[in-house]
Amino acid sequence: NLLNRTLGLLKKNCESTLVMDSTMAAEGTPLKDTVEKLVEKARTNYESLSLSTACEAVLEIGNAGNSYMDQRAPSMLFKQGGVSAEAAAKDLVIILEVMRIIAVALSPIAPCLSLRIYSVDQFNSITWNDTKWGGPKGGQVMAQASPVFARIELNAENDVEEKVKDSKKKGKAKVKVEQPQAVAEA
């Protein structure tokens, strides 16, 4: 969601083009230090095969990116125009860098997901060295926003809802929904 929100704002306000390098954009921003510490935490946990702790560190990076987006509110800054719009464009570069780093940091456990995120950022190969800050460059045109996850439909719930609707139409009072039967103890 953070990726698509950011790409949408970038398209609407910056013609999908990054206004500066991510390294320059992050100068003086504590988010960069936070992300670098969390990447190191993820790396050490991957190396010790503590996969759940590594994933938690990557999720913390995502939470930090979401918090940054909420605090900075680039959509409001773009509406103000002028210097505020310039700051908002810089914020989008920072957030896209965070998303790129998340994609790389997830690659050991979710390589296909990582490539989907990473390819949106116009990159096509992943190594752990890519977790270093400084990927996106000024003038780079980003891909259009598209869902990274497909919508999941719960067929069992839909089937029950359809049975209830059908029974109401036919005037039946009850709908029998099959429940799993308990296994008898020996």
Image (spheres, rainbow, N blue to C red):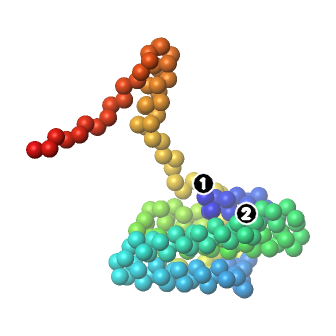
Rounded to the nearest angstrom, the CA distance separating label 2 from label 1 is 13 Å
Q: Disc 2 or 1, which lies upstream in sequence?
A: 2
The amino acid type of the residue labelled 2 equals: Leu
Q: Residue at x 73, y 77 (%)?
A: 20
In the image, 51 versus 148, the foreground residue is 51
Please identify the residue farthest to the left as the structure is shown: 186
Q: Which residue is mark 1?
A: 146
The location of residue 128, given as percent across then percent down, is 47, 79
In the image, 47 versus 179, the foreground residue is 179
Please identify the residue farthest to the top as the structure is shown: 171
Instruction: Say whether residue 139 is visible.
Output: no
The location of residue 2, given as percent across then percent down, is 63, 62
Q: Residue at x 73, y 70 (%)?
A: 71
Figure quadrant of residue 176: top left
The location of residue 121, given as percent across then percent down, is 60, 67
Q: Residue at x 29, y 37 (%)?
A: 180
Instruction: Say whether residue 181 is visible.
Output: yes
Q: Which residue is mark 2?
A: 10
The amino acid type of the residue labelled 1 equals: Ser
Look at the picture and state if 80 lies above or below 19: above
The secondary structure type at the circle numbered 1 is loop
Mark 2 surroundings: few (<14), some (14-19) or many (≥20) residues within 10 A: many
Look at the picture and state if 14 lies above or below 186: below
Query: On the rendered structure, is 89 left or right of 122?
Result: right
The location of residue 162, given as percent across then percent down, is 47, 27
Query: On the rendered structure, is 26 left or right of 151?
Result: right
Mark 1 surroundings: few (<14), some (14-19) or many (≥20) residues within 10 A: some
Q: How many marks?
A: 2
The secondary structure type at the circle numbered 2 is helix
